Image (cartoon, rainbow, N blue to C red):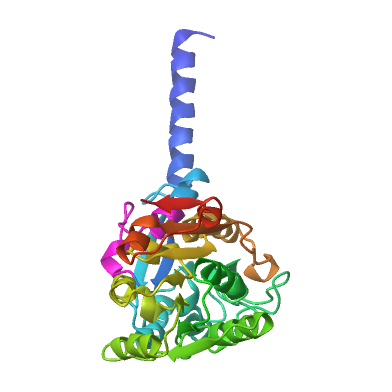
Amino acid sequence: MNRRAFIGGLALETLATLDVARAQPPRKVYRVGILGTSSTTSDLVGPEPRSAPMRALLRGLHELGYVYGEHFVTEPRSGEGKLERFPDLAAELVRLRVDLIVSPGPALPALKQATSTIPVVMAGAADPVGHGLVQSLARPGGNFTGLSLQLTETTGKRLELLKELVPGPGPVAVLWDRLGAAGRGPWDAALSAARERGWKVLSLDIREFAGKITGAFKAATDARAGGLLVHPVALFDRNAERIAELAASNRLPAMYGLRRYVEAGGLMSYSADTNDIYRRAAVFVDKILKGAKPADLPVEQPTKFDLVINVKAAKAIGLTIPASLLSRADDVVQ
């Protein structure tokens, strides 16, 4: 082949390649809706959000090969601890026609009401079957799948750990919200576990935080409660620091259902790792974006639960943590 023919052929090949490139449609950038519960919306925004769970979700997607801005973007909204905001925010994400939505437990009922078609990845549902979000863990059967927290199922374990710390005869006060996503589940589980073991429990059902929480702690101290069991709901999550402060000022040893309460100054928590749950939620996002149906993706349950103890908080109320309990802790905050 002479030089002129070679150059001509190369030019034609280059033009053909450019034509193919021009003919290819641009890569779709997926929009992932985020409906948060207690964080501010600003904490959920962008490729480097301030929210630790959101960072875990984006890290999980990055590990699967997704690049923010190139393969997907997020559309975050948050109820910021106000249950009444969830229906409007859920409806807003539906109107935006996002490709899927990731959300933790408290906001899931609102999403269930808002859409039966947009896939929803549960980033920790307290009781997905009991709350009617899925038909079963093995076969969700609708547009919801993801991960559960098993919060209600582990209530008895939290109660046991708290009574090991404060074994006296005083009742354990249970702080819960019947209007939360879990309904009566947390209280019923605590009451059942206490009856089996011959322990007393005191119900502190808080439906409005402001003006009610101080009275709840007074009721606990008047009843000479030996400890406090806090079931996490959106209303409490947003006020975790205030709850921890009140527990300390009332010298009431408290066990929480999420680690974030210990990070806010609380004494002790026993729960699944929520950051790990968000990271694992990325696997569900990946499968759905690649064509899998939520109805066919089994709901995952946490297999590892962490006991976190805040020694500093214990010292502040003059409490000594037994060595047997400290040795079983997965993390000790000094």
The residue depicted at 39 percent of the width and 49 percent of the height is 70
Horizontally, residue 69 falls left or right of residue 21, namely left
Q: Quick check: 331 above or below 36?
A: above
Examine the structure image and report whether residue 254 is included in the region drawn in magenta: no
Horizontally, residue 32 falls left or right of residue 77, namely right
Image location of residue 105, percent across then percent down:
50, 75
Toward the top, the furthest residue is: 2
Judge whether residue 329 can be spotted in this image.
yes
- Of the 4 image quadrants, the one containing the N terminus is top right
Image location of residue 99, percent across then percent down:
48, 67
Image location of residue 125, percent across then percent down:
55, 73
Residue 89, quarter of the rendered image: bottom left
Q: Quick check: 138 above or below 220?
A: above
Q: Quick check: 7 above or below 208?
A: above
Disc count in the image? Answer: 0
Q: Which residues are magenta?
A: 39-58
Examine the structure image and report whether residue 55 is included in the region drawn in magenta: yes
The residue depicted at 56 percent of the width and 74 percent of the height is 159
**Between residues 100 and 111, which one lies in front from this camera angle?**
111
Image location of residue 304, percent across then percent down:
60, 56
Judge whether residue 95 can be spotted in this image.
no
Residue 138, quarter of the rendered image: bottom right
**Between residues 126 and 62, which one lies in front from this camera angle?**
126
**Between residues 150 and 333, which one lies in front from this camera angle?**
333
Toward the right, the furthest residue is: 138
